[in-house]
Amino acid sequence: MCPACYLNGFLFLLFGAAGASIANNPWIIAIAVILTIAGFYWMWKAWKRRSPGTFKKNLKTTIIFLLVFAAGFITASYMTHEYFKNLYS
């Protein structure tokens, strides 16, 4: 199991489905279909790379990836939005 592969697949599926749900332009629909197919490919690739006995290691790695993403998102939100400035000033 490849945690980064699952995250990539999830993001591709998320963006592909979001693009398909709001698109009215054929080019955007084509890009959404390509992103969705890429998402299914990454999910299949992650499933193919699984091995027995590594569930705890993979779960730990996935949680670390998500925490790093959350820390980066919070830092970017703090630096680019004025929401936090209203709280502390």
Image (cartoon, rainbow, N blue to C red):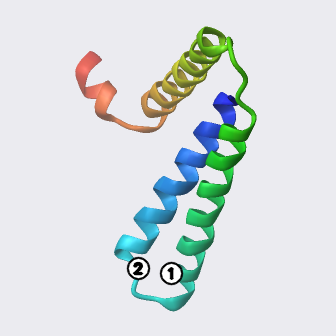
Residue at image position (59%, 15%) is 64
Q: CA distance from mark 1 to mark 2?
A: 6 Å
> In the rendered view, would you say 20 is above or below 6?
below
> In the rendered view, would you say 5 is above or below 42?
above
Q: Nearer the viewer, residue 38 or 78?
A: 38
Residue at image position (52%, 80%) is 28
Left or right relative to 56: residue 25: left
Residue at image position (69%, 18%) is 52
SS for tag 1? helix
Q: Which image quadrant is residue 55 in?
A: top right
Q: How many marks?
A: 2
Image coordinates of residue 65 in percent, x first then y, are 60, 23
Q: Which residue is mark 1?
A: 29
SS for tag 2? loop
Residue 56, labelled with which disc? none
Amino acid residing under circle 2 = Ala
Q: Quadrant of the C terminus?
A: top left
Residue 23, labelled with which disc? 2
Image coordinates of residue 76 in percent, x first then y, are 51, 32
Image coordinates of residue 30 in percent, x first then y, are 58, 81
> In the rendered view, would you say 73 is above or below 71?
below
Q: Which image quadrant is residue 36 in?
A: bottom right
Q: Earlier in the sequence, mark 1 or mark 2?
A: 2
Amino acid residing under circle 1 = Ile
